Image (cartoon, grey):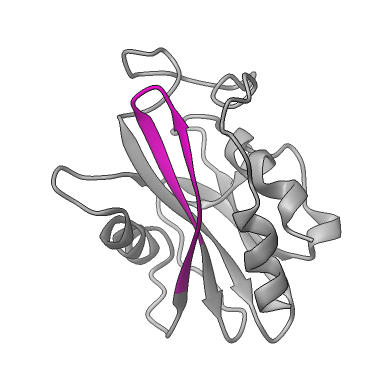
Amino acid sequence: MHNRLISALKRIFANDDDAIGSGKWASTTDPTGKFWGTAGAGGIFFANSTGRYLLAFRSAQVNEPHTWGVWGGALDKGETPDSAIRREIREETKYTGEYELFPIWVYQKGEFKYHNYIIMVDDEFEPKLCWETEDFGWFNRDNFPKPLHFGLKAVLPFLK
């Protein structure tokens, strides 16, 4: 399952979907009018033992509020995408167990780049939420809740 998942996600093609970054809940703050900052990193937890994904239900205080999405955010000055996703995991879930990161895709539009990862864990866990997330859930790919964040929508077809 793991190799098939990573292989499928790597097949994502050109990142020119006009719908990305223009969701109906989009709140914008960068010069392009579409994104928060100029770079970010995020990921989807995948539990090997159950084959389910951990999604975040975004709070009212963030862009694209009250949508289901990934865990992540903007890169801090001088930060690499790998270090940013590790920091975001600590900040947004307080997860301290073992995990493996698999870079799967870099969405790019203009100067904005968002680095997407699969965060592979052995077992499901209960994240300790911060202000950015109101709820969470472990879901099978065929039963993802709605509404979905536009970034998660962009990778859905490749999570089979």
Residue 140, by quadrant, is bottom right
Furthest residue in direction right, as rendered: 142
Residue 110: image x %, image y %?
39, 22
Give yes or no for residue 72 being in the magenta stretch: no
Magenta extent = 101-117
Furthest residue in direction left, as rendered: 78
Residue 86, by quadrant, is bottom left
The answer to whether 52 appears left or right of 151 in the picture is right
x 62%, y 66%: residue: 6
Prevailing secondary structure of the magenta residues? strand
| In this view, 122 is above or below 63 | below
| In this view, 16 is above or below 133 | above
Most foreground residue, 121 or 11: 11
The answer to whether 56 appears left or right of 142 in the picture is left
Q: Quadrant of the N terminus?
A: bottom right
x 51%, y 33%: residue: 60
x 61%, y 85%: residue: 123
Residue 48: image x %, image y %?
66, 82
Give yes or no for residue 104 being in the magenta stretch: yes
The answer to whether 87 appears left or right of 52 in the picture is left
Q: How many marks?
A: 0
Residue 34, by quadrant, is top left
Residue 146: image x %, image y %?
76, 41
x 29%, y 61%: residue: 87
Residue 90: image x %, image y %?
34, 66
Q: Quadrant of the C terminus?
A: bottom right
Most foreground residue, 15 or 69: 15
Most foreground residue, 129 or 74: 74
Most foreground residue, 69 or 94: 69
